[in-house]
Amino acid sequence: MKIFGDTNSGNCLKVKWVCDRLRLPYRWIDIDTMKGETRTPEFLKLNSAGQVPTVELDDGRTLAQSNAIIRYLARGSDLIPADPYTAAKMDEWLFWEQYSHEPYIAVCRFQMVYLKKPASELDPEKVKRGHAALARMEQHLAASRFLAGEAVSLADVSLLAYTRLAHEGGFDLASYPSVRRWIGESGKALGLPPAQ
């Protein structure tokens, strides 16, 4: 299997983390999105949307969208809860991450880290919605060790990718102690080095 990804992307790291955790063999193909490498004719043949991550399976089929990829790769593993309702709650978090978390936390990080914008120039609505996402996670994690069930799942993988880097987007996690605890515990359960 080949993973076409950018190691600066949380969405790409999700796929790497799942493969590493499940010991799935893969070859990482580094794609620099800032240099337009997702817009080449060769890459667009793999993924016409021109986005990473993209996975090319051993049989030549391709799959895109980080949460779809990790859902496929983790089938039958302990990263997907066995209980159908808990698995559906995991999926609920996966959908929420892409709609109500990543567009704010990750976009603010991108603007500060890659576009070199100061926090004062970020869209106030994105900042507000990023804090709303973190507050929702804080409320849930104050009463629960992980996001879906009693063990780490794909919900934690998905939300960990950008939450652990939220400070790089101007989001001070000091007000979110349960989120900070969860970052450490989820990272440890996934075998990741401590977040910077």
Image (cartoon, rainbow, N blue to C red):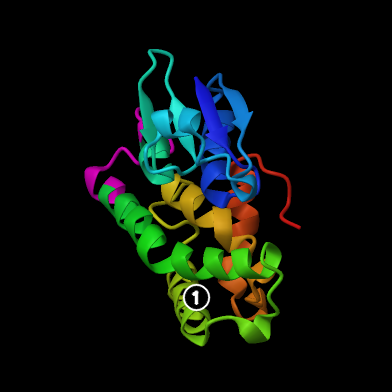
Left or right of 18: which side holds 169?
right
The answer to whether residue 126 shows anywhere in this view is: yes
Q: Is residue 82 magenta?
A: yes
Residue 65 placement (x, y as % from top left)? 39, 43
Left or right of 154: which side holds 34?
right
Residue 91 placement (x, y as % from top left)? 31, 50
> Residue at position x 66%, y 77% from top?
172
| Above/below status of 74 relative to 85 | above
Q: Which of the image's four quarters has the C terminus?
A: bottom right
Q: Which of the 4 quarters of the picture holds residue 163? A: bottom right
Mark 1, secondary structure of its residue: helix
Which residue type does callout 1 highlight? Answer: Gly
Residue wearing tag 1: 130
Residue 115 placement (x, y as % from top left)? 67, 66
Q: Is residue 156 magenta?
A: no
Residue furthest to the left:
84
Number of residue marks: 1
> Residue at position x 50%, y 41% from top?
39
> Residue at position x 35%, y 21% from top?
61
Q: Main secondary structure of the magenta part?
A: loop
Residue 54 placement (x, y as % from top left)? 46, 35
Q: As rendered, which of 5 and 69 lies closer to the eye?
A: 5
- Span of residues in magenta: 72-87
Q: Which of the 4 quarters of the picture holds residue 165? A: bottom right
| Above/below status of 106 relative to 125 | above
Q: As rendered, which of 26 and 154 lies closer to the eye?
A: 26
